[in-house]
Image (tube, rainbow, N blue to C red):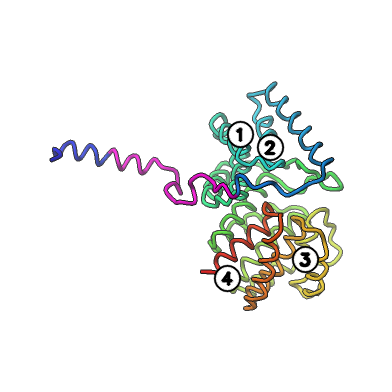
């Protein structure tokens, strides 16, 4: 029999250990990522592109080794690893960065992104929530592109990416109210047309899922023909479709003729989701299954379709 005093000490220790665990630990999702995703090959790229990406990774590694106390050098090493599909390695680099620079929101932002890639949504939420707290009251900053667009003009910022990815993480887990709040915050820092259409698209879909059509319609009001879009053309065309300016079936047929890509998956997911919240569940399943039979498994459209298929099967 345990002495009452020893029992009390043991109980306090157990409670302290439980409270010390980060949010989400203990959930089966938060254990090691499934080998299905860790070991899955990244979406294919041309031999020339891969060679260039590997050269940039080597350059980033050399720069990091020469400047180990530069947080930016560490972030770029992680980003270059992730572009080549080495997501677990990238997460390890970011985790070490968090140990050295715990108040730098960029490490949580980038690690959270790669937790999404590996379907560790609860861990992603934890990271983005932490990042959102760290940027509170601080000025925003442009985030340089690792894979620049055709005009080599960055279209996103640190604050934008934190709120955008936090909203996505909530959306993927069915936490629509939290997703809505995050996307509204993101809209506040969406200062150019590309950022505006990206945020508006997910915000619109979230509101439609919540059956809040009048509010969803207001999201579409700033969207007009002739906007200068650099890289988020898929989201832009979907928003025009929602407004009735683009044929849904025509957009679907055109997209299905294209080579599978993250951009085409964005369009397909938007159309499939339109079917879903309009009660055409079989049509939604058809589009989602077609998407998830492809190799663009790292794209947000693919991940969202995958999550919806699981919910539809429940």
Tag 4's secondary structure?
A: loop
The residue that label 1 is drawn on is 93
Distance, label 4 to label 3, CA atoms, is 21 Å
Q: Which residue is mark 4?
A: 210
Q: CA distance from mark 3 to mark 2?
A: 36 Å
Residue linked to disc 2:
81
Q: Nearer the viewer, mark 3 or mark 2?
A: 2
Which numbered disc flags the more N-terminal residue, 1 or 3?
1
Of residues 142 and 289, which is closer to you in this image? 289
Q: Earlier in the sequence, mark 3 or mark 2?
A: 2
Quadrant holding the N terminus: top left
- Closest to the camera, between mark 1 and mark 4, is 1
* Mark 1 or 2, nearer chain start: 2
- Per the image, label 2 sits on a secondary structure element best described as helix
Mark 4 residue crowding within 10 angstroms, few (<14) / some (14–19) / many (20+) = some
Give the distance between the C-alpha atoms of the residues marked 1 and 2, in whole angstroms: 9 Å
Q: Which label sits on residue 206?
A: none
Alpha carbons under labels 1 and 4: distance apart? 38 Å
Task: Check whether the beta carbons of the residues at disc 3 and disc 2 lie within 8 A of each other.
Answer: no
The nearer-to-camera label among 4 and 3 is 4
For the point 77% across and 74% down, which residue is it? 248
């Amino acid at each position: 029999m345990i002495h009452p005093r020893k029992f009390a000490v043991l109980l306090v220790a157990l409670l302290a250990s439980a409270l010390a665990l980060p949010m989400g630990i203990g959930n089966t999702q938060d254990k090691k990522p499934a080998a299905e995703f860790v070991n899955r090959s990244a979406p294919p790229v041309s031999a020339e592109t891969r060679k260039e990406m590997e050269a940039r990774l080597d350059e980033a590694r050399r720069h990091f080794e020469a400047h180990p106390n530069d947080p930016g050098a560490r972030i770029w090493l992680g980003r270059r690893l992730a572009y080549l599909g080495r997501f677990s390695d990238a997460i390890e680099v970011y985790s070490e960065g968090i140990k050295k620079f715990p108040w730098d929101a960029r490490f949580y932002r980038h690690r959270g992104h790669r937790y999404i890639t590996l379907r560790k949504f609860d861990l992603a939420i934890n990271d983005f929530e932490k990042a959102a707290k760290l940027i509170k009251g601080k000025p925003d900053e442009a985030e340089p592109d690792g894979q620049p667009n055709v005009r080599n003009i960055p279209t996103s910022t640190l604050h934008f990416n934190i709120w955008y990815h936090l909203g996505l993480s909530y959306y993927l887990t069915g936490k629509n109210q939290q997703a809505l709040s995050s996307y509204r915050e993101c809209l506040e820092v969406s200062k150019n047309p590309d950022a505006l259409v990206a945020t508006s698209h997910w915000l619109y879909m979230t509101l439609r899922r919540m059956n809040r059509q009048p509010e969803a319609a207001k999201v579409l009001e700033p969207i007009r023909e002739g906007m200068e879009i650099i890289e988020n053309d898929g989201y832009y065309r979907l928003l025009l479709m929602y407004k009735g300016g683009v044929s849904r079936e025509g957009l679907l047929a055109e997209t299905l003729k294209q080579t599978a890509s993250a951009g085409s998956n964005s369009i397909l997911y938007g159309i499939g989701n339109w079917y879903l919240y309009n009660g055409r569940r079989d049509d939604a399943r058809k589009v989602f299954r077609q998407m998830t039979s492809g190799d663009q498994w790292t794209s947000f459209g693919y991940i969202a379709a995958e999550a919806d298929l699981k919910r539809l099967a429940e």
